[in-house]
């Protein structure tokens, strides 16, 4: 199962990228935090410190992913074409 659907890029999220080393992804509604963490670590070769999930009012699921200090989130955001 693919837990991650796609990354999200808004002005607010770019603030999280720069200030808190976090990225935000839309994820499968059934995906657990552990599955999301594992998939992001394997796909992007980064260390994930924390995953927080939110169900939007539309019923979609977002994952706020805090990366370890080894790889700045801004570098990954640039690689993903979000910047």
Image (cartoon, grey):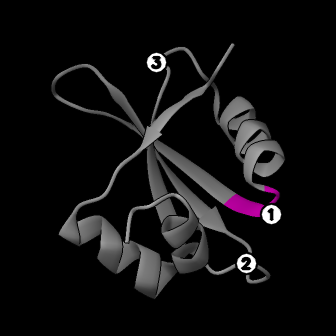
Start and end of the magenta stretch? 45-49
Q: Quadrant of residue 9?
A: bottom left
Q: What residue is shown with label 1? A: 47
Where disc 1 sits, the SS reads: loop
Marks 1 and 3, Cα distance to the nearest angstrom? Answer: 23 Å
Q: Are marks 2 and 1 in contact (CB under 8 Å)?
A: yes
Q: Position of residue 6 (x, y in %)?
A: 45, 37
The residue pinned by badge 2 equals 71
Nearer-the-camera pick, 36 or 6: 6
Q: Where is residue 12 shown, x and y percent of the image?
A: 23, 69
Assess disc 1: are there few (<14), some (14-19) or many (≥20) residues with their C-alpha within 10 Å of its C-alpha.
some
Whether residue 35 sits left or right of residue 53 in the image: it is right
Please name the residue shown 52% across and 78% down the image: 74
Mark whose residue sits in front, 2 or 1: 2
Q: Which residue is mark 3?
A: 29
Query: Mark 3 vs mark 2: which is more N-terminal?
Result: 3
């Amino acid at each position: 199962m693919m837990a991650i659907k796609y990354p999200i890029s808004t002005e607010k999220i770019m603030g999280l990228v720069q200030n808190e080393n976090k990225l935000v992804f839309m994820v499968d509604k059934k995906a657990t935090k552990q599955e999301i963490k594992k998939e992001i670590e394997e796909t992007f070769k980064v260390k994930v410190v924390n995953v927080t999930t939110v169900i939007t009012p539309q019923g979609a699921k977002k994952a706020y992913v805090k990366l370890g200090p080894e790889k700045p989130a801004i570098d990954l955001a640039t690689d993903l074409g979000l910047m």
